[in-house]
Amino acid sequence: DTGVSQDPRHKITKRGQNVTFRCDPISEHNRLYWYRQTLGQGPEFLTYFQNEAQLEKSRLLSDRFSAERPKGSFSTLEIQRTEQGDSAMYLCASIPPVAGVHEQFFGPGTRLTVL
Amino acid sequence: RKEVEQDPGPFNVPEGATVAFNCTYSNSASQSFFWYRQDCRKEPKLLMSVYSSGNEDGRFTAQLNRASQYISLLIRDSKLSDSATYLCVVSDGGATNKLIFGTGTLLAVQP
């Protein structure tokens, strides 16, 4: 499978626990985005990486959230001290390093449930 | 006001019907426009990009009116398999080209 992959697909955790999600973009895609989608809403932007550099973070990304892309390939999103309001689908998307290409291809998402 | 506004529906239509979805966006700096399709509990999948000249892909036709900041999607000869949520999406016009999504329009095609 050469698409964007995410792991885990589902995560159930108790309030206050830390969780970490992983995204593997399509090979050679240097631009990577994280979004969050809650029930009945469209996805909302969280953060953007170009190669290993995190170039933009949304105000939605509180200090409990941190994202990394250490080698410019896979990325991780960590949520510390989870709250029930963090329950959502976390989506990762990537774009190749081609000028003028803006279509984003999404992974299957990680569905987080905080009890 | 939301940056991208869509009628949430649901649109309940019989098989074979033609259905149209509309969307408005507020950011005049947006440069890229898309329709994504999302099935229940799945990720959004690109249906088509939208251009000012209009574009067609089989039964699907998309139109963009930059002056009115309005995007449309027309589905002809609806199939049961078209049942999904259709997300209107625009780029934010900034350096990162992050996407701004509408809340989606739910389409249910009935047999």
Image (cartoon, coloured by chain):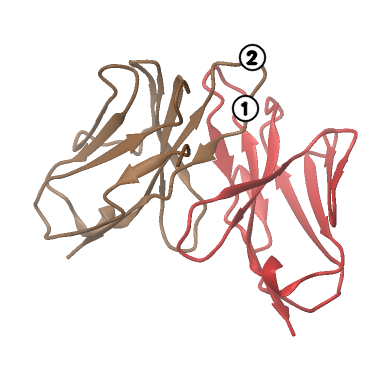
Lateral position of residue A10 relative to residue B19, left or right: left
Q: Nearer the viewer, residue B24 or B85?
A: B85
Residue type, label 1: His
Query: CA–CA distance between discs 1 and 2?
Result: 8 Å
- At numbered mark 2, what does the secondary structure look like: helix, strand or loop? loop
Q: Amino acid at mark 2?
A: Ala
Most foreground residue, B108 or B88: B108
From this viewpoint, is residue A2 visible? yes
- Percent across and percent down for residue A81 are 11, 46
User: Which chain does the numbered disc 2 sit on?
Assistant: A
User: In the image, is A102 to the left or to the right of B19?
Assistant: left
- The location of residue B86, given as percent across then percent down, is 65, 57
Tint applied to chain B in the drawing: red
Chain A rendering hue:
brown
Residue placed under numbered mark 2 in the picture: A99
Which residue is identified by label 1?
A: A102
Question: Residue at (58%, 49%) from the top-left corner?
Answer: B45
